[in-house]
Amino acid sequence: MNPATKKISTRTLCTAAFILLCGCATPPAPEPAAVEIPQTFFEDFQASAAALLDSGMLAAVGSAESKSPELAHNRALTDGRRRLARLLEAKIDLLRRSAADETGKPADDPVFNPLDTIAQTMIRDRIQSLSPTRIEEETISGTVYVYGLMQLNPQLIIDQLIKEKALYELLKPTQAFILLFRNIGTLEAASAE
């Protein structure tokens, strides 16, 4: 190899090594920041309902979709009321079964019959005419999605139970009653503020 070619090869090799070393020495590109995905209205409403349930309220989310905004609103309210009614019935049933276990009475004992009446009265008089505490709609590709948050203060159930004195006196000392209505005082204090 001729000395001039050897000199060019050495320079080329050194330049290539320098470029490689410089390329490896650059810090890696920063990772793209995590994109925060916004909550949908439904997820937001579900979180609100869960917070209300944790505070002692009875709450449910109704949802519906339609091309017609009015129809979507009506269906969402109906769905919310239906879900709240089912929740109320489940709470009353849980109260009945738990109180029956604690008192030693069978769950079908006539002393618990007023619970069915209370549930039906609450559904008919309160829930069926209940307005949502919050309602939102969004339109996506021409379809209207409506979400409504329905809530019921459990104090209304206690007010009905008090009218059934024998049942109320039987239920009041039970753990089931205490757990179901444990946050009534907190709710009353919060609403007074």
Image: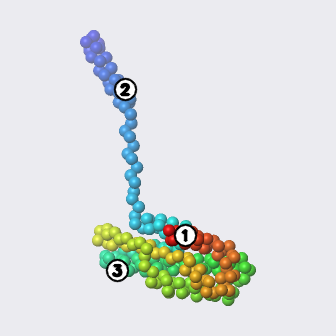
Q: Which mark is residue 21?
A: 2
**Which sits in the foreground, 173 or 26?**
173
Which badge, 3 or 1, is on the more N-terminal residue? 3
Q: Residue at x 47, y 67 (%)?
A: 48
Q: Nearer the viewer, mark 3 or mark 1?
A: 1
Quarter of the figure that contains the N terminus: top left
* Spatial CA span between label 3 and label 1: 38 Å
> Which label's residue is closer to the chain start, 2 or 1?
2
* Residue occupied by mark 1: 189
Question: Marks 3 and 2, how far apart in space?
Answer: 67 Å
Residue 50 appearing in the image: no
Q: CA distance from mark 2 to mark 1?
A: 69 Å
* Amino acid type of the residue that numbered disc 1 sits on in the rendered structure: Ala
Picture residue at 32% right of the left edge, 72% below the top: 143
Q: Position of residue 17 (x, y in %)?
A: 35, 23
Query: Total marks drawn?
Result: 3
Neighbour tally class for label 3: few under 14, some 14-19, many 20 plus, Cα within 10 Å: some
As helix, strand or loop, the secondary structure at mark 3 comes to: helix
Amino acid carrying label 2: it is: Leu
